[in-house]
Amino acid sequence: MFYKIKKYSVSLCIIFALRMDYELLNKLPVWCKREGVGFAILCGGSRSAPLTLSLSGYSEIKCIAANDERSAGFIALGIAKATGNPAIIVTTSGSAVANLYPAVVEAFYQQIPLLIFTADREPHAADRFDGQAIEQQQLFGKHIKGFFQMPLNIADPVVFHYNVHEAFKILQTGKPGPIHINFPFKEPFYPTKYPFVYHDAEPILYNSVLKPSHHQTSIRIEEFPQLKTVWNNTSKKLLVCGFDAGKYYDTEQIYQFAKHHQIPVITDITSNVPSNLTHTDLLIRNIEDGDLFAPNLVITIGGNHTSKILKNYIHSLPISHRWHISPFAVEHDFFGTPTEHIITHTFFADTDFDLKEQEIYNHAWQTHNHKGAETFNNFIKTISFHELVAVKTIIESIPADSVLHIANSMAVRWANMIGNKNNIAVHVNRGTSGIDGCTSTAVGMAIAQPQKQHFLITGDMAFQYDNNAFFNNNIPDNLTVIILNNQGGNIFKLIDGPTADMPVEKYFSNNHGLTFEYMAKHFGIDYVQLHNLDELTAFLQRKYKKVNIAEIFFNTENYKSVFDLYKNLKF
């Protein structure tokens, strides 16, 4: 025991001798700007003051103050999605860092670049149970691309330069994702000279390394005779586009490729790829001649799919060949089928495939699609005002050049049943598919894209879970939030499993009987209640000049019955 006390005493003497090197720290924002960083989200805290002052004083990076770390992480994620460049998030030490975890895991699975700068207490602070002290090193585990521990008060310039160099190298190569840099700081946190003077920092070593180009890899079919053989011997090719498929591939090239080769295209609402098939679940449920529609080559791009019916369908098929096209070497298998991974950025532009007969197969799918669309539209006309009707109306009514955000749970499922009618840009947090952060992500993207009108379709549970997205001074004017208020998590009334004798409404749906009128007043946001299709249609025809919230109320008594009717539609 005496030895431990003596050891800590020595450590404390060393700690007190260190002084903050602000001149070295102020190189960081200069380097970040060179790497494409344009935004930083700064959360309040005294221990993070060196980072906050260094970044906020540098005019080349726009800094945004945020009060809730959980929301701030998703705002940063939204900005990074909108710009395609890394965004910085700064927090103080302790539980503030842990509150970033939902956004970090979402960024990891969505492959979104984030720079997470966290202040920390001096070594051994957590062992002494000091305030705002937890074990922050490697806190995010496997959900980050890299972790770097800075020296106390960045007193060692060699380690500082090395960490920044390695962080940027990892950030800009391979799959995008979050990087965590932990900065332990000892008082005093505030400089004696302020504001800072920023100098053009010397290039870090990483700038000599070539960044990956979106055109660095192409695939020529003559170089892969096994692929050419498969292509020439299959007459029933199907293209399936999952989450963010349009992120790495030109959607017009995908469309022309499919059109040229007469390939049916199934897309998820989150893929942002034009489709020649709609209402996928309805189409699959009504397949009677399995051999007629079963493909012998499935080509997949993008991530996971919202539709469980589609995933089960692909998994159940005796597919001879499946190609997954990706710019990255390692991809997950979403369908549980044998897969050949083809790594290329330019498959749909540069691949020299022969034109093979697909007319019969494509015609079968297009005829099936026409019948499905007609059946669905006739069904919509027969039902009363329902969430499905509301989501369809919103998707078909908002301007084509706007951005549509959709929250998880039922909102994205309704949208996926309908499809993207006008090829509107759609964004959904399907990395982990949680309801947390949906509003904050939309706020972040709207901040980064002020020239576009943004719409968010969300449920009441998802919205209340993230209403701190508006607890800041940077609420964008170009955001319209549409809340589908069904008085709880009514998805539990639709999924298989819960029965009438279970306490579903009390413990799963959590029926609340509340509205968001006073929350909107609290944040000074324009608010309106909608109760029918005419009111919704009139609202969507308005001109949007500032942030506003529309809350739609439904008769929840027909919530499940309409869904059951949809599941049993036949044509």
Image: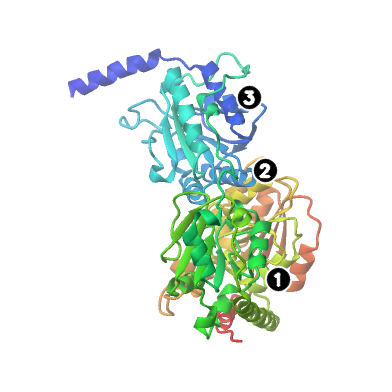
Give the residue at x 63% y 45%: 444
Foreground residue, 132 or 366? 366
For the residue marked with disc 2, what is the amino acid? Answer: Ala
Q: Which quadrant does the N terminus fall into?
A: top left
Real-space Cα distance between discs 3 and 1? 48 Å
What residue is disc 3 on? Answer: 57
Does residue 384 appear to the left or right of 289 in the view shown?
right
Q: Which quadrant does the C terminus fall into?
A: bottom right
Foreground residue, 451 or 553? 451
For the residue marked with disc 1, what is the amino acid? Answer: His
Residue 46 placed where, x, y %? 51, 28
Q: How many neighbours does mark 1 have within 10 angstroms: few (below 14), some (14-19), or many (20 or more)?
A: few
Secondary structure state at the residue bearing disc 1: loop
Answer above or below: position of 275 versus 67: below
* Residue 58 numbered mark, or none: none
What residue is disc 1 on? Answer: 531
Foreground residue, 486 or 97? 97
Residue 155 placed where, x, y %? 44, 17
Secondary structure state at the residue bearing disc 2: helix
Real-space Cα distance between discs 1 and 2? 33 Å
Real-space Cα distance between discs 3 and 2? 20 Å
